[in-house]
């Protein structure tokens, strides 16, 4: 009886055989995004840093903890802050869940950014993976938007003023700015309507979009021929003809089977026996470790550090200094130097440059020594932003004036 | 069905589909744009002139307005919303200037930009006397920084 139930769920052969190990992946809805076999090289930590997995696991953690927090949260100014206090002091496991959600969110920004850097330095956005890079940049943008909308929900002073500044940056965009601001806030000032709108965006609209894009992102990895080989490999990795799709011809007719069996459009030829291992157990074991490490890191942070909560939002009193979340401080620093346009124009150009990168970067080589200009330009932009961010974080005090971090009574960090 | 009618039917269908999607977008846009704003009124009564003796400006927190009373010239009202990114500026009596805590803009007592990223001077708002004798401030009406309302005592 038990055996027949199990057989009805797991249809493949037992994983003691090679056929069974393939079927375990192939017949399983949750696992079949994996190939049955993976290259050994791609499982090495130094190949990817597992940054994509870490980002995905952080998204899972954020989804679960976020769902839990929703049970105790009213998106209404008179209640929102009280709910935060309840989560801090009354709700069982409330502080732990809130801390986890906050730190996982911040780690996600870091992980996604490092993931982007890794893919850039490996040149993995080049043909045939251009479109997946675009999806990835859109996901980065979504993560930042999720973080921005989530930042308002505690309805404390920091939230209120960070979002006031943020939405006014939006409003400074030419032509559409003021209308977009009203759409975003559901009014002209940050109030009841704005909190509700940010809540709906944060818990439904944006996670839905992100989930859809994540699915496309993962699916495209397979369809684009798996992970990109290391850029340091000798000759073999130079644009292989076999990664190109098989050209179609009007003289031939194709059935579905002609596409599905044989070599899928972009499939890299099945690696040699000694280069590849079965996904079960080799890849799954490592993914499991990555998941446990990510969860452990988030939980440790949640146990050690409490998510900040300042006083209840007061529209009539701007705290001094008013700082955005730390990863937006580079933009705030820029905005404080020149008109609000630099809060819109420069970031928009940057996002556009990132989105279109695979299409204007005509250099076919993925080897670092052939890409010195691209690599150093990228490093320069990242470094410039980091410097601006650190200035905003440690060197700005009351009235956004310059202070030395070691001087007494400085503004403190975000 | 011949080739010609098939093509024209397809074109018409495609056009109808695009038009429907476009109308959906316009509808969504209009749906998200509220018809009623539950916000503090843009034109409001601040109180009776006698409530505001000359001296330091009074900050009206709900409306974010500084009300000045000059003994010689009368009443004037400045918006406390920084013209840079909308933070609330604070009046410093010591330096007789407005200071923005967000990005360090500083405005003179007449609203002119002294320092920082603010692109425009602070807005001065029309102050009138309502029928019941209260000071009425209209945030929809900007006036020059020399505008004052003199109320005979």
Image (cartoon, rainbow, N blue to C red):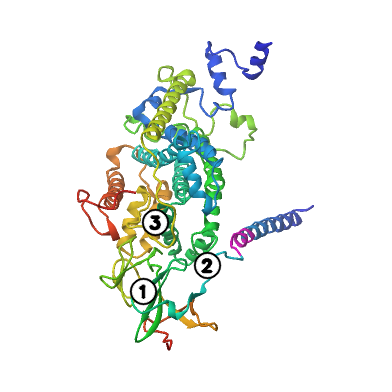
Nearest to viewer (mark 1 / mark 2): 1
Marks 3/2 same chain: no
Pointer 2 indicates a residue of which chain? B
| Residue located at (26% from left, 70% from top) | B94
- Give coordinates of residue B34: x percent, y percent: 60, 63
Marks 1/2 same chain: yes
Residue B1 or residue A219, whichever sits in front: A219
Q: Is residue A337 left or right of B86 when viewed as pictured? A: left
Nearest to viewer (mark 3 / mark 1): 1
Quarter of the picture holding the N terminus of chain A: top right
Q: Which residues are magenta?
A: B26-34
Cα gap from disc 3 to disc 1, whole angstroms: 43 Å
Residue indicated by mark 2: B40
- Give coordinates of residue A337: x percent, y percent: 30, 62
Residue A15 or residue B54, whichever sits in front: B54
Label 3 CA crowd tier, 10 Å (few <14, some 14–19, many 20+): few
From where the camera sits, is residue A127 visible? yes
Residue indicated by mark 3: A349
Q: Is residue B31 magenta?
A: yes
Pointer 3 indicates a residue of which chain? A
| Residue located at (28% from left, 51% from top) | A384
Pointer 1 indicates a residue of which chain? B
- Give coordinates of residue B56: x percent, y percent: 34, 74
Q: Is residue B30 magenta?
A: yes
Residue indicated by mark 1: B57
Label 2 CA crowd tier, 10 Å (few <14, some 14–19, many 20+): few
């Amino acid at each position: 009886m038990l055996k027949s139930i199990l057989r009805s769920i797991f249809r493949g052969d037992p994983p003691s055989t090679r056929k069974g190990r393939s079927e375990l992946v192939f017949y399983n809805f949750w696992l079949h995004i994996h190939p049955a076999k993976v290259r050994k090289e791609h499982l090495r930590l130094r190949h990817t840093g597992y940054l994509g997995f870490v980002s995905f696991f952080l998204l899972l953690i954020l989804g679960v903890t976020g769902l839990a927090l929703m049970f105790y949260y009213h998106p209404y100014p008179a209640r929102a802050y009280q709910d935060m206090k309840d989560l801090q002091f009354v709700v069982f496991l409330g502080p732990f869940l809130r801390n986890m959600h906050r730190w996982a969110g911040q780690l996600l920004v870091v992980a996604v950014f490092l993931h982007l850097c890794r893919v850039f330095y490996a040149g993995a956005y080049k043909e045939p993976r251009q479109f997946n890079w675009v999806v990835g940049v859109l996901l980065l943008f979504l993560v930042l938007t999720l973080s921005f909308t989530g930042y308002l929900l505690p309805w404390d002073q920091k939230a209120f003023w960070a979002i006031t500044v943020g939405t006014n940056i939006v409003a400074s965009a030419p032509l559409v700015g003021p209308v977009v601001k009203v759409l975003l806030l559901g009014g002209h000032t940050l109030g009841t309507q704005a909190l509700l709108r940010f809540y709906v965006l944060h818990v439904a609209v944006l996670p839905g979009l992100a989930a859809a894009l994540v699915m496309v992102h993962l699916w495209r990895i397979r369809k684009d021929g798996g992970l990109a080989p290391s850029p340091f490999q000798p000759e073999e990795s130079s644009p292989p003809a076999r990664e190109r799709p098989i050209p179609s011809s009007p003289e031939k007719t194709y059935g579905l089977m002609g596409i599905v069996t044989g070599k899928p459009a972009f499939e890299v030829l099945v690696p040699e026996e000694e280069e590849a291992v079965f996904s079960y157990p080799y890849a799954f074991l490592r993914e499991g470790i990555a998941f446990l490490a990510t969860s452990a890191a988030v939980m440790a942070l949640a146990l050690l550090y409490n998510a900040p909560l300042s006083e209840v939002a007061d529209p009539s009193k701007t705290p001094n200094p008013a700082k955005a979340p730390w990863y937006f401080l580079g933009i705030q620093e820029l905005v404080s130097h020149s008109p609000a346009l630099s809060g819109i124009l420069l970031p928009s150009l940057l996002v556009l440059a990132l989105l279109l990168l695979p299409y204007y970067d005509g250099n076919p080589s993925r080897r670092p020594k052939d890409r010195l200009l691209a690599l150093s330009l990228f490093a320069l932009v990242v470094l410039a932003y980091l410097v601006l961010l650190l200035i905003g974080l440690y060197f700005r005090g009351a009235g956004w004036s310059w202070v030395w971090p070691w001087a007494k009574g400085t503004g403190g960090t975000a | 069905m011949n080739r010609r009618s098939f093509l024209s039917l397809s074109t018409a269908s495609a056009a109808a589909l695009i038009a429907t999607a476009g109308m959906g977008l316009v509808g969504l846009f209009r749906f998200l744009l509220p018809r009623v704003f539950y916000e503090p009124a843009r034109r409001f009564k601040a109180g009776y002139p006698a409530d505001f003796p000359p001296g330091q400006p009074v900050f009206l927190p709900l409306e974010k307005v500084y009300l000045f009373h000059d003994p010689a010239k009368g009443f004037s009202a400045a918006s406390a919303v920084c013209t840079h990114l909308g933070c609330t500026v604070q009046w410093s009596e010591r330096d007789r200037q407005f200071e923005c805590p967000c990005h360090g803009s500083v405005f003179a007592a007449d609203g002119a930009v002294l320092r920082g990223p603010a692109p425009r001077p602070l807005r001065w708002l029309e102050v009138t006397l309502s029928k019941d004798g209260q000071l009425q401030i209209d945030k929809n009406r900007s006036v020059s920084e020399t505008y004052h309302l003199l109320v005979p005592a």
